[in-house]
């Protein structure tokens, strides 16, 4: 059996390779015909059974046959009527070639001639209109697209108290505008790529030209161009293709919906990847510490920001290790617990039939299930889940003797700790790694827990994101970059960009800007 | 190539993990947490052990909602068993207990007087050798260890905790297993262990102490002498002294807030001498006289009275310890050893005879640091207060 299976596998692989994943028919790659009728026919052929594609025949200057092709509701009909059809249908128009029509007759800001069918079809699917004129070779791609978009709202996943609340939306065009509005410089480059054989999703690589490391940019483009897939629905697809370590549970790409975050990262020499159809923007390269920094750290004053940041680091550890620590100490190292505490732990455990480890696993599963249920359910039912969860887990499970009260507290504390991680993507591996760690500590005690933590740290040390070590600037130690890790340096101290990212353009602000009376902060001087 | 080679090794490493199970695991509700251990001599050279076991269910009630108010039984359970040795007795005791005896939280070890008379060196060895036992458990001596361990503490969770708190409150270093072992193995081979007795079924009372020499009982000290010894050993920082002030003809209560005792050894022409310098810092607690403490002369008067009082106490203590019991629990041996190592080598085997002959000179210095919240005696009319 196994021999056959092997053969079959090989066969299938070959098939896939030979078949390919071509989205378009073969005729697409051919150039547009000189013959107007032939072009018309091929376009009609391509878009058979596409009710939404409109073929509108008319005459230019009341004589020459022409046809306008566009997609309903993706193109702005008003603009077509006013700025395309009206001027063209005037008497005096004499169509010789597209260039003159464009320059003299069409009041449209963005239009370009197309030469192949695939280009034409692509333009159409983007909402542009195609103009074919008899006797004129090729077609004209008129940018009149206009489709329904969601308004710009505050991202629900990344709320801030202080700071910009603007979030990206599903349209990459709008998203790039949002960035451009914050970075008003020609140094902001927005390179466009199209990925997905069927979806032809527009992917924009945004970077600051004289800050970004050229090798990094090259690598990003290289990795993006490697992607060959039928469709890109969300930026998550792209993320899966460009990671350094696909088998690691840790995210190696920063995902954000906030325009200010992307702007700040661009200024630090990182590269943003915007994907059409997804409000989630990818930022590379990142480190573990960037995942623990919230946007708000930079907007609030540095002293409270530093405090909150260190709290977050602590909670990060708690979120992965607290249940393991509790299980390890109560089942292996009872002597390490203060006596009075031990007595109440013991009292709480008296009626529990299952071992602590099972109890912890049970509670963790219940908690994860609740969390997942709350996330997936419609918001109206969500509150019901919360109530049931709180009642069942918080109260009933304890009085029924299923779990002990300290365990409920431990699991709840862990849950809260995991919510303090500002990046949702980093919270996920924490939740996942908690379980193996729990089993290790339940079987080997603190030794097992530390073994597990060691393994995680070793793994983190091997990770990198686009060549940047995941734990930098902690490992490798880069003293200068610690200003944004161990504490959040005041802005007048954050005078350099991260070393790894922008070695050639390190300085980000003029030196000696510390405010104070001597620096003009004292009003008496001016009087 | 290398990948394929590594895979079986991975399996070899990972599979044994499944075999270990939870070999060392012990659930909290499978433990008999022992809060105190008692050791007493039984008939025919046998040893009786007492254990005070915490019963969490009665101590804290059940879980949430299911609180069993006073559901019978005390907070702790007293068990006892007799065997040839302590481990033998404990082994027998384990057979009678459904849960594994757990010693990680034993804070109290009470030796019976008879056991101490027989010598407690083997028991100390057991306590130190045991991997679970805490070396910081307090050691006491009692006439009846069973009674101490049977005390049901009204406020604290266990009697052991009550006694531990008492020790902490009095701010004196109580003897723990580690210290005891060190003292017994020290130059003088003596030890002082506080004495504890139950006042009634709920109150233990630490009062006086017992002196051991070479692990065996030599004598008992009353509370006054015990405090003297502790002061001398710098192990008591806090105490109250009542003074008779000659001029005021009334009492004065002062509290020693800090004291420092220095011993200066000297050997002159074969005569061993020891100067004991006591420096105490005091607060005035109560002033029954009519003297205003604003006057430094009166304060000095109080200091002198206190010096006299402490001197008398020190002399009394020395009389008892040095001459009656002849047990060097004052640390003279270590002091001489450090200063005169060569001379010490000659006398170390007959220190018992040398110690009572050491000439001791006591120097006391008392400073009144604070006179309290009022200078003049409160509640007395101004004209009656003696200012000069």
Image (cartoon, grey):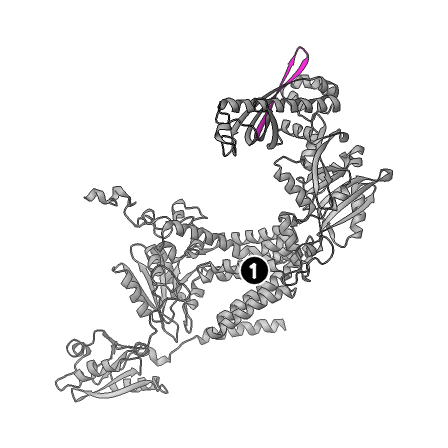
Which quadrant is the N terminus of chain A positioned in? bottom right
A202 or A448, nearer to the observer: A448
Q: Quadrant of residue A514?
A: top left
Q: Residues within 10 Å of mark 1 (few under 14, many from 20)?
A: many
Q: Secondary structure at mark 1?
A: helix
Residue B323 position within the rendered picture, expressed as x and y whole percent measured from the top left: 73, 21
Judge by depth and name the residue closer to the eye, B185 or A191.
B185
Span highlighted in magenta in the image: B256-277
Magenta span: predominant SS is strand
Q: Is residue B14 above or below residue A12?
A: above
Q: Image height check: is A142 above or below B6?
A: below
Residue at 39%, 74% in the rendered image: A197
Quarter of the figure with the C terminus of chain A: top left
A395 horizontally vs A484: left or right: right
Q: Which residue is tagged 1?
A: A411
Q: Magenta segment: does it hold B265?
A: yes
Name of the residue lying farthest toward the right: B44
Q: Residue A268, position in %: x, y?
A: 34, 54
In this orientation, does residue B1 appear?
no
Is A102 placed left or right of A322 in the picture? left
Q: How many marks?
A: 1
Disc 1: which chain? Answer: A
Q: Position of residue A480 (x, y in %)?
A: 38, 45
Horizontal relation, residue B21 to residue A233: left or right? right
Residue lying farthest left?
A92
Residue at the (81%, 42%) spot, across then down: B48
Is residue A247 rendered magenta in the image? Answer: no
């Amino acid at each position: 059996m196994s021999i056959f299976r092997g053969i079959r596998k090989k066969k299938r692989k070959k098939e896939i390779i030979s078949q390919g994943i071509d989205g378009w028919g073969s005729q697409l790659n051919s150039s547009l015909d000189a013959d107007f009728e032939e072009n018309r026919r091929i376009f009609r052929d391509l878009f058979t059974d596409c009710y939404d594609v409109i073929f509108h025949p008319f005459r230019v200057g009341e004589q020459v046959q022409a046809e306008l092709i566009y997609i309903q509701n993706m193109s702005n009909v008003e603009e077509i009527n006013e700025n395309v059809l009206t001027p063209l249908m005037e008497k005096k128009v004499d169509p010789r070639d597209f260039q003159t029509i464009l320059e003299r007759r069409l009041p449209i800001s963005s239009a370009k001639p197309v030469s192949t069918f695939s280009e034409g079809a692509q333009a159409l699917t983007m909402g542009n209109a195609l103009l074919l004129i008899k006797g004129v070779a090729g077609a004209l791609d008129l940018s009149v697209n206009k489709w329904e978009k969601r308004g710009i709202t505050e991202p629900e996943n990344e709320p801030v108290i202080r700071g910009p609340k603007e979030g990206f939306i599903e349209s990459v065009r709008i998203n790039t505008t949002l960035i451009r509005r914050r970075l008003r410089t020609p140094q902001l480059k927005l390179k466009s790529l199209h990925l997905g054989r069927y979806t032809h999703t527009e992917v924009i690589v945004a970077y600051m030209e004289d800050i970004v490391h050229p090798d990094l940019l090259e690598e990003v483009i290289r990795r993006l161009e490697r992607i060959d897939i039928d469709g890109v629905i969300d930026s998550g697809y792209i993320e899966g293709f460009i990671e350094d370590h696909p088998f690691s549970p840790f995210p190696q790409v920063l995902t954000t919906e906030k325009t200010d975050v992307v702007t700040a990262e661009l200024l630090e020499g990182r590269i943003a990847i915007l994907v059409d159809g997804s409000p989630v923007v990818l930022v590379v390269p990142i480190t573990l510490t960037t995942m623990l920094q919230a946007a708000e750290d930079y907007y609030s004053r540095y002293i409270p920001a530093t405090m909150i940041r260190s709290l977050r680091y602590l909670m990060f550890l708690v979120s992965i290790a607290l249940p393991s620590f509790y299980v390890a100490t109560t089942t292996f190292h009872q002597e390490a617990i203060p006596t009075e505490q031990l007595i109440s732990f013991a009292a709480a455990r008296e009626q529990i039939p299952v071992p602590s480890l099972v109890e912890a696993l049970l509670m963790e599963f219940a908690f994860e299930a609740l969390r997942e249920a709350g996330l997936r359910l419609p918001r109206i039912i969500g509150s019901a889940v919360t109530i049931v969860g709180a009642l069942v887990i918080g109260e009933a499970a304890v009085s029924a003797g299923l779990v002990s009260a300290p365990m409920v507290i431990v699991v709840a504390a862990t849950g809260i700790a995991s919510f303090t991680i500002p990046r949702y993507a980093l919270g996920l591996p924490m939740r996942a790694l908690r379980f193996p760690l729990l089993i290790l500590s339940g079987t080997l005690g603190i030794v097992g827990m530390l073994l597990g933590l060691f393994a995680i740290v070793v793994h983190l040390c091997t990770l990198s994101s686009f060549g940047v070590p995941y734990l930098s600037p902690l490992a490798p130690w880069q003293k200068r970059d610690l200003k944004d890790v161990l504490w959040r340096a005041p802005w007048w101290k954050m005078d350099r960009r991260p070393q790894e990212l922008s070695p050639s353009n390190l300085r980000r602000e003029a030196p000696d800007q510390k405010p104070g009376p001597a620096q003009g902060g004292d009003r008496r001087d001016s009087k | 190539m290398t990948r394929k080679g590594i895979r079986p090794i991975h399996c070899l490493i990972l599979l044994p993990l499944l075999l270990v199970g939870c070999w060392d695991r012990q659930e909290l509700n499978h433990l008999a947490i022992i809060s105190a251990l008692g050791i007493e001599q039984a008939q025919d050279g046998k040893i009786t052990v007492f254990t005070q076991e915490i019963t969490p269910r009665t101590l804290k009630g059940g879980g949430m909602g299911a609180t069993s108010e006073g559901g019978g039984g005390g907070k702790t359970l007293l068990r006892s068993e007799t065997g040839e040795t302590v481990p033998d007795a404990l082994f027998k005791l384990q057979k009678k207990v459904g849960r594994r005896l757990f010693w990680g939280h034993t804070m109290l070890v009470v030796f019976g007087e008879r056991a101490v008379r027989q010598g407690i060196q083997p028991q100390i060895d057991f306590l130190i050798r045991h991997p679970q036992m805490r070396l910081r458990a307090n050691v006491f001596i009692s006439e009846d260890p069973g009674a101490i361990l049977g005390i049901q503490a009204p406020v604290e969770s266990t009697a052991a905790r009550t006694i531990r708190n008492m020790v902490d409150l009095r701010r004196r270093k109580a003897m723990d297993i580690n210290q005891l072992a060190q003292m017994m193995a020290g130059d003088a081979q003596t030890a002082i262990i506080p004495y504890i007795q139950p006042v009634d079924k709920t109150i233990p009372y630490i009062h006086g102490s017992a002196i051991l020499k070479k692990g065996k009982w030599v004598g008992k000290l009353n509370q006054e002498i015990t405090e003297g010894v502790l002061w001398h050993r710098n192990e008591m920082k806090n105490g109250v002294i009542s003074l008779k002030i000659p001029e005021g003809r009334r009492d004065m209560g002062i509290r020693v807030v800090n004291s420092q005792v220095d011993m200066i050894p000297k050997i002159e022409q074969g005569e061993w001498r020891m100067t004991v310098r006591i420096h105490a810092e005091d607060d005035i607690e109560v002033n029954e006289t009519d003297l205003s403490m604003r006057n430094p002369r009166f304060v000095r008067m109080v200091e002198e009275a206190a010096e006299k009082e402490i001197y008398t106490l020190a002399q009394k203590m020395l009389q008892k310890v040095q001459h009656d019991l002849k047990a060097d629990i004052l640390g003279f041996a270590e002091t001489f050893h450090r200063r005169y190592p060569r001379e010490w080598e000659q006398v170390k085997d007959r220190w018992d005879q040398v110690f009572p002959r050491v000439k001791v000179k006591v120097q006391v210095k008392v400073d009144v640091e604070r006179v309290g919240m009022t200078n003049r005696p409160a509640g007395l009319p101004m004209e009656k207060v003696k200012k000069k």
